[in-house]
Image (cartoon, helix red, strand yellow):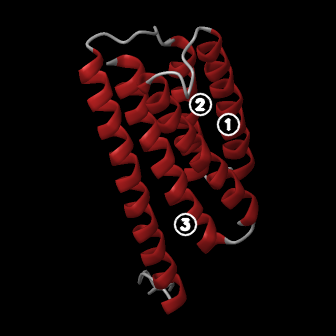
């Protein structure tokens, strides 16, 4: 009869998990600072000078949520494809906003919008690199999935904060 005992993680696995949790804590603090900056700029502005799109960022949110389900089922290629699609569509949003006059160096609103969304995109790229590096390595794939879920959760907060409210 098979043992139903849970396998204890090795020291290496435990160290890697603790390292990932520390890294995610640092990233969470960085994002919190950006969200705080966004809130201050938004409160001081009274009304936002540029109308941000809703449909494309909402679709991007759906892509990332789907990617979280994909990585939970160990579908790394599908996760990567959805992440790449997210970056491509987010680039469309940035180009549209730049054409409408919301520039990263033009106003406080533009600076905080691009800082927040570019910082998130940088983390999506890091997640894609991690996914590419962990193929076939179950323990590392779990850490990449943890990072990916974090990135997706940050996007949901970004979407709600920046595009909805």
Residue 101 sits above or below residue 119 on the image:
above
Residue 104 appears in which quarter of the rendering? Answer: top right
Residue 80, percent from left and from top: 71, 45
Are discs 1 and 3 less than 8 Å apart at CB? no
Mark 1 vs mark 2, CA separation in Å: 6 Å
Mark count: 3
Q: Which mark is residue 82?
A: 1
Residue 74 in view: no
Residue 20, percent from left and from top: 48, 69
Residue 148 sits above or below residue 107 on the image:
below
Are discs 1 and 2 less than 8 Å apart at CB? yes
Crowding at dot 1, Cα within 10 Å, few <14 / some 14-19 / many 20+, comes out as: many
What residue is pinned by disc 2? 63
Residue 99 sits above or below residue 135 on the image:
above
User: Which numbered disc flags the more N-terminal residue, 1 or 2?
Assistant: 2
- Residue at 30% of width from left, 23% of height from top? 42
- Residue at 69% of width from left, 72% of height from top? 137
What residue is pinned by disc 3? 143
Residue 82, percent from left and from top: 67, 36
Mark 1 vs mark 3, CA separation in Å: 19 Å
């Amino acid at each position: 009869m098979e043992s139903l005992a849970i396998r204890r993680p090795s020291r290496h696995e435990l160290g890697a998990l603790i390292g990932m949790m520390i890294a995610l804590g640092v990233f969470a603090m960085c994002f919190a600072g950006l969200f705080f900056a966004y809130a201050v700029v938004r409160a001081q502005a009274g009304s936002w000078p540029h109308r941000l799109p809703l449909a494309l960022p909402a679709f991007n949110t759906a892509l990332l949520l789907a990617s979280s389900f994909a990585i939970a089922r160990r579908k790394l290629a599908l996760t990567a494809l959805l992440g790449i699609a997210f970056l491509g569509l987010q680039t469309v949003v940035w180009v549209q906003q730049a054409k409408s006059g919301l520039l990263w160096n033009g106003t406080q609103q533009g600076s905080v919008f691009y800082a927040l969304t570019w910082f998130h995109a940088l983390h999506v790229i890091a997640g894609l690199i991690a996914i590419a590096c962990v193929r076939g390595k179950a323990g590392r794939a779990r850490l990449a999935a943890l990072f990916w879920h974090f990135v997706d959760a940050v996007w949901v907060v970004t979407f709600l904060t920046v595009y909805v409210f």
